[in-house]
Image: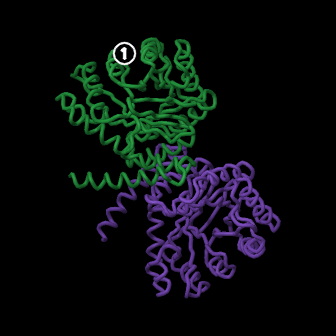
Chain colours: A purple, B green
C-alpha cells in the first residue's frame, strides 16, 4: 500500500517496498526554544534556515508546527508555511490538533500534504477527519482512544481500527491513513518499546497501512539519546515502520544504513550518496562557524 | 537454551532471555597491524592493554587469535592467553582453525572456554569437534558446507544442521553449539544482510540454539562503518542473535540500548551504568593522551 504526498514539484511515496521516508521534526517550537523566540519576533529567516537545513540533510517531508504561547497560531501557521515554501519544495506535514490552525496551513500547502494528526477520540474524529477529506490530504492516526493511550498492543490495534473505519465512512481511502503506534520512554517503562514494536507488527498484518513513528520520545530522560533513538529506528523499520517524524541530521545515516541492510538500496547508491553529501555539509557548516 | 562459559571466577550465560553477550574482537592481528607488530616483538604489554581496555568497555568474553605470518603461532597462543589471564578474569574464546593452536590455548584457558570455530566441512568437523569435546568447551559453528558459504538462508540452515548433528554424535550437547550464520558485506550484495537475518530466524526456530555474529564484516568497503554495524547489530538482536564477536568500544552503547528497547533491562539499570562507566573511561583515556 502506497501513501503519496506531493508538493508542486515533488512526489514522495511511502510504502514498505520503498526507502524509509524522513519527515523533518525541527519546525516545532516545543523543545526548540530558539524557534519559539523566532516566532515571537516574526523572524522568518530562522524558520527558512531550519527548513533548508533539514532538506539538505535528507528530510523528504517537513513537519510544520507553530504551537507556542503568546502568538496568533492561525496567522503564524500561514506565515511559516509561506516562509518554508519560499525556500524548499518538499511536501509538507501540517501539525496541529486545532481545526482552524490546520485549515490555515492546508490552504497554503501545495499538492497533497499530510496532516499530523487525528486520534481515536470522538471529538478529534468528528472535527479533524472532515478537514482531511475536504483537502484531499493524507493523515497520521494516533493509536489513542477515549480512555487515553492503551497499555497493550491489542488495544492500540483496536484504536487504529477506529481511526481507519471512521475515515473510510467519510470517504478517506485507507492508503491515506498512516498509523502512528506511539512510543513512551523506555526510561520509565522497560516494556514501552516492545509494545510499540508489537503494535507495528499487528497493524501491518491486519490493515497493511503505512506506519509512522515519532522516534525521539523513546529516549526521553535518558543519556546518550541518539544511540537509543538510532537503535529504536532500526528495530521499528525492521518491524514494519515506513516513515518517521524525526531529526534528519542525527538519524539520516541510521535510516539509510537500515534500508541498505534490509535490501532496499541496490549497490549502496543511496547510502553512499548520502554519506558524500553530508560529509560536504559537515565541512560547510564547520566553515560557516 | 543457555550456553554457559566460565573463567576461574566468572560465569557468562548466553541466551535469548539474557542480556546480549559481547565477545571482544580486538585480540586479533588480522586488521590490527599494531598487534601483529607487538606479537613479532613479543610485546605482551600491548596485548595486556588491549585485553584490559576491552573488558573495561564491557566485553563479557575475549576472543584470542594469533594468526600472523612469521611467528610460531602455537607458542604465541600460549603466551597471549597467559598475558590476558594475568590482567583479566573473563572467559576466553580461543580462535583458530589449526588444531594444535586451539589445543595450546584451550590447555591454558581456565573454566569453560569457547572455541572459534568449526564449520560444516568434513575436514573441520573431524578435527575440531573432538578437541572441543575433550576439553568440555563450547564451540561456534559457521554455516559453511563443503561447497563454501551457501547463498540462501535455507542452505545455511542445512549447514548449521550438519554441525549440530555431528557434534551430537560425539556427545557435545546442543547448548554448547553457537551457530554463526555469517554475513558478507552489503557493499557487494544488497541482499547480504537479509540472508543473514533470515538464517538467524530459521536457525532459532528449528534448533533454538544461540546465535553469534561477527558484526563488522557487513560494512566492509563502505564509509561510516560504525553506523552500518550498529544498525545491523540492532536488527540481528531483534531477529534472535544472542552474542557477537565485535568491538565493545564502538558498539557497547548500541548493544545495551537494543537490550533496553527489547525489554531486557529493567529500570534502564545496565544502560545507565554503562553510560556512566564509559563517560569516565572517555575522560581517563583523553587525559592519558
For image coordinates 45% across by 54% down, the residue present is: B272
Q: Is residue A167 visible?
A: yes
Front-most of residues A27 and B206:
B206
Q: Which residue is mark 1?
A: B99
Q: Is residue B116 visible?
A: no
Circle 1 packing at 10 Å, graded few (<14), some (14-19), many (20+), is: some
Relative to residue B227, is residue A80 depicted above or below?
A: below
Name the element at disc 1: helix
Front-most of residues B183 and B286:
B286
**Which image quadrant for residue B130?**
top left
Front-most of residues A29 and A148:
A148
Chain containing mark 1: B
Relative to residue A45, is residue B26 depicted above or below?
A: above
Residue B34 lies, in percent from the top left, at 23, 36
- Of the 4 image quadrants, the one containing the N terminus of chain B is top right
- Is residue B276 rendered to the left or right of residue B17? left
Front-most of residues B186 and B272:
B272
Residue B172 lies, in percent from the top left, at 52, 18
Amino acid at each position: 500500500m502506497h501513501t503519496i504526498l506531493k508538493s508542486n514539484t515533488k512526489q514522495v511515496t511511502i510504502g514498505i517496498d520503498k526507502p524509509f521516508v524522513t519527515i523533518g521534526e525541527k519546525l516545532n517550537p516545543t523543545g526548540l526554544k530558539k524557534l519559539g523566540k523566532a516566532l515571537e519576533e516574526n523572524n522568518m529567516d530562522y524558520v527558512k534556515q531550519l527548513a533548508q537545513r533539514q532538506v539538505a540533510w535528507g528530510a523528504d517531508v517537513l513537519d510544520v508546527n507553530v504551537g507556542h504561547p503568546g502568538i496568533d497560531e492561525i496567522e503564524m501557521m500561514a506565515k511559516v508555511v509561506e516562509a518554508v515554501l519560499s525556500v524548499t519544495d518538499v511536501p509538507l506535514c501540517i501539525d496541529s490538533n486545532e481545526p482552524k490552525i490546520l485549515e490555515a496551513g492546508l490552504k497554503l500547502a501545495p499538492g497533497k500534504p499530510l496532516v499530523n494528526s487525528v486520534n481515536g477520540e470522538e471529538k478529534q474524529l468528528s472535527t479533524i477527519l472532515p478537514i482531511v477529506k475536504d483537502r484531499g490530504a493524507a493523515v497520521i492516526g494516533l493509536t489513542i482512544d477515549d480512555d487515553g493511550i492503551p497499555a497493550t498492543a491489542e488495544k492500540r490495534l483496536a484504536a487504529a481500527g477506529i481511526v481507519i473505519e471512521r475515515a473510510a465512512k467519510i470517504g478517506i481511502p485507507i492508503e491515506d491513513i498512516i498509523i502512528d503506534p506511539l512510543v513512551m520512554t523506555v526510561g520509565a517503562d522497560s516494556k514501552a518499546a516492545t509494545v510499540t514494536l508489537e503494535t507495528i507488527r499487528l497493524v501491518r498484518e491486519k490493515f497493511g497501512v503505512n506506519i509512522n513513528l515519532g522516534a525521539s520520545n523513546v529516549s526521553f530522560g535518558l543519556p546518550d539519546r541518539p544511540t537509543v533513538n538510532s537503535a529504536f529506528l532500526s528495530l521499528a523499520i525492521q518491524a514494519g515502520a515506513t516513515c518517521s517524524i524525526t531529526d534528519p541530521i542525527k538519524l539520516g545515516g541510521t535510516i539509510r544504513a537500515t534500508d541498505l541492510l534490509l535490501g532496499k538500496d541496490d549497490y549502496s547508491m543511496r547510502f553512499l550518496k548520502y554519506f558524500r553529501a553530508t560529509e560536504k555539509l559537515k565541512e560547510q557548516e564547520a566553515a560557516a562557524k
